[in-house]
Image: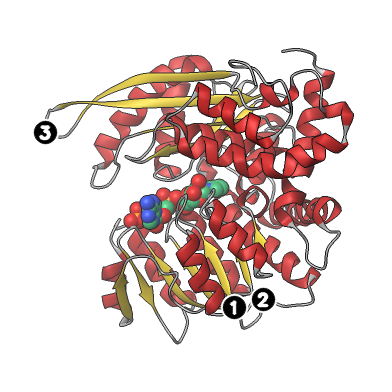
Amino acid sequence: MKENRLTSISLEDVLTLVKQRDPDQPEFLQAVHEVMESVIPFVLETPRYQRKGLIERLIEPERMLIFRVPWEDDEGNYRVNRGYRVQFSSALGPYKGGLRFHPSVNLSIVKFLAFEQIFKNSLTGLPLGGGKGGSDLNPKGLSDGEMMRFCQSFMNELFRNISSDKDVPAGDIGVGEREVGFMFGQYKRLTAEFTGVLTGKGLSYGGSKVRMQSTGYGLLYFVDEMLKHHGQSISGLRTVISGSGNVAQFACQKALDLGARVVAMSDSDGFIYDEEGLNEEKLNLIIELKNERRGRLSEAAEELGCEYHEGSPWSVPCELALPCATQNEIGENEAKALVQNGVVCVAEGANMPCNDKAIHTFRDSGVLYGPGKASNAGGVAVSGLEMSQNSERLSWSFEDVDEKLIHIMKGIHNKCVDYGGSGKRVDYVRGSNVAGFIKVADAMIAQGHV
Ligand code: NDP
């Protein structure tokens, strides 16, 4: 290992290189570790991928933008946030990945998300590169007017660097249909063009049916495949879902459709516990509370007459665990508690919600574990379908898009089996990382040293 250069291909050298370049980026390091732990053994067996600086190029973003976002709040105070867009890889297509507005956002988090996105997008089979962005804005408590002014200011800088063929952002934590609408409006005003530059748009101006549901529904389609492949069924499984935002809401809806018993959901303060299990009516109340009234789950518990507890929901016994909130919400202790309580399957709706130790605990205990880059790829997949519809100036039916989503999730599951299926249980970590890597690596080799 020489300064800023790999002299051999080993996990240790790759991680040393990342640490040398970016000593203050723990989440990015964690994401590289998780991917390279499966990719490097595969590369060492496959000489074609050992040359041409492939690994070094893969871990360095093509471009990183950091910019000031000045805006004015309702009291007339001048406020300043920081904006980010990491355009990590365009090997497979235009950069694609969401924007996150949350006070924890920093370069390490945006880089980890963009890095994961490269392999996730590759798994969908669609022509999408990997990117991610956002801001350290705290959206809680902002009025519609404040959010609009913030989004407009954010786009005043970002618009120069994105377009429907260059970089197509979408939503993520803190960025839903309202924020996408404000940013789309400003992009249109600045460029005088109506193009599919953002996905997750409202249905009246170019959004795709099923986009809102896609990450949560896709997660459950993937879980269904995982369980069926191992001779099990989702029906009747006692289920805990973390989060109560976009992904969690529609994961819950599809879990109920498939016959699961969802006993807990959470937000960043605590969780509701309903031994009877949620039903459509209770879920609709939660959705209305979160999306319209922008309230807390503690209020939902009162309205539903069920238990509410502070903290994370992972102590609640369940057979199916669906982390759909944020990164590193399941560490070793939470994973051990889940295993002790009889969890059968853990599948990630969020990005990197399980840390390395938690993943090893699940794999060592024979728990079926679906990593986010495979199990939550439904969101970006339907974003890709939204881009196709925008280019064609067409709008497909709900049934058409849902069918395509099911097909894509089954395809991702098959790829995981192809590359991670030699043991008694499919190794979804290895399967998704290696399958995602191969397509990107082949495209990079074909495109030369860029
Ligand atoms: P939302 O903002 O709609 O919802 C996020 C939910 O997670 C909220 O309930 C929020 O609680 C909770 N949450 C956020 N931060 C924390 C925290 N630090 N600790 C505990 N709970 C927290 O976001 P999404 O549903 O869109 O995204 C959730 C996850 O899914 C993210 O990891 C995202 O990257 C991933 N993802 C999203 C996709 C999408 O299409 N939206 C696609 C693929 C992955 P509160 O209500 O209190 O804020």
Question: Mark 3 to mark 2: distance in Å?
Answer: 51 Å
Crowding at label 2, few (<14), some or many (≥20) Cα neighbours within 10 Å?
A: many
The residue under the point 66% across, 80% down is 235
Q: Percent x, y for residue 353?
A: 51, 53
The residue under the point 42% across, 42% down is 175
Circle 3 residue: 75
| Residue 230 relative to residue 62: left or right | right
Question: Mark 1 to mark 3: distance in Å?
Answer: 47 Å
Q: Secondary structure at mark 2?
A: loop
Location of residue 361 with respect to 80 vertically, above or below: below
Q: Which mark is residue 234?
A: 2
| Residue 157 relative to residue 432: left or right | left
Q: Secondary structure at mark 3?
A: loop
Q: Percent x, y for residue 40?
A: 74, 37
Q: Earlier in the sequence, mark 1 or mark 2?
A: 2
Give 20 or 199, whichever is nearer the viewer.
Answer: 20
Q: Earlier in the sequence, mark 3 or mark 2?
A: 3
